[in-house]
Image (cartoon, rainbow, N blue to C red):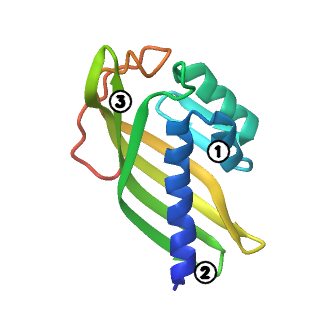
Amino acid sequence: MSTAADTTAVTNLIAQYAELVDAGDFTGVGALFADAEFIGDGGSVRGSAGVEAMFHAMVIRYEDGTPRTHHVTTNIAIEFDEAAHTATARSYFTVFQALPTLPLQPIAAGRYRDRFQRVEGHWRFAERRVSMHLTGDLSGHLRMRVPAATPRDNLGD
């Protein structure tokens, strides 16, 4: 059984990811995955440098240094394996964006499946799997074209 402190620490890591991406702090995002793998629909990268480089290559940042997005993470469910010092979490995300040429709107929605490990008393990401379920207008967010996601009824992805 986890403690409230463990649940809060893991939830805070999930929230910190969204805050760093929305701030355009891709170095900070990379640091969250120092010893972790980031797996998306287009492949995977490992470690700080790989994750940071992926975000710089994929995400458009504007004059203010941000992607002008707002990530909302909901339906967070966390399970702990105390003996192994690990945790898993699943959650939904919705990404909103507003630009001078794009009114505020959701541009993507999907699911995170995360693995965490506790090392020397601190929780950290071990793996993040991102599954995009719905996409809107990503032209002001991503540098590359992403195939439109198809709605999924199953929760086993």
Q: Earlier in the sequence, mark 3 or mark 1?
A: 1
Residue 56 seen from this side: yes
Residue at figure coordinates x 51%, y 73% from the top left? 7
Residue to which mark 3 is pinned? 97
Q: Nearer the viewer, residue 140 or 150?
A: 140
Residue to which mark 1 is pinned? 37
Mark-to-mark CA distance, 3 and 1: 26 Å
Q: Nearer the viewer, mark 2 or mark 3?
A: 3
Q: Earlier in the sequence, mark 1 or mark 2?
A: 1
On screen, residue 154 versus residue 83, left or right, reads: left
Q: Amino acid at mark 3?
A: Gln
**Residue lying furthest right in this view?**
120
Q: Earlier in the sequence, mark 2 or mark 3?
A: 2
- Classed neighbour count for the residue bearing mark 2: other residues with Cα under 10 Å, few (<14), some (14–19), many (≥20): few
Residue 82: numbered disc? 2
Residue at figure coordinates x 73%, y 75% from the top left? 121
Q: Nearer the viewer, residue 39 or 33?
A: 33
Task: Tell me where residue 109 appears, x and y as whole percent.
Answer: 32, 39
Q: Which secondary structure, mark 1?
A: strand
- Classed neighbour count for the residue bearing mark 3: other residues with Cα under 10 Å, few (<14), some (14–19), many (≥20): many
Looking at the image, residue 80 lies above or below residue 123: below
Q: Amino acid at mark 1?
A: Glu
Q: Nearer the viewer, mark 3 or mark 1?
A: 3
Q: Amino acid at mark 2?
A: Glu
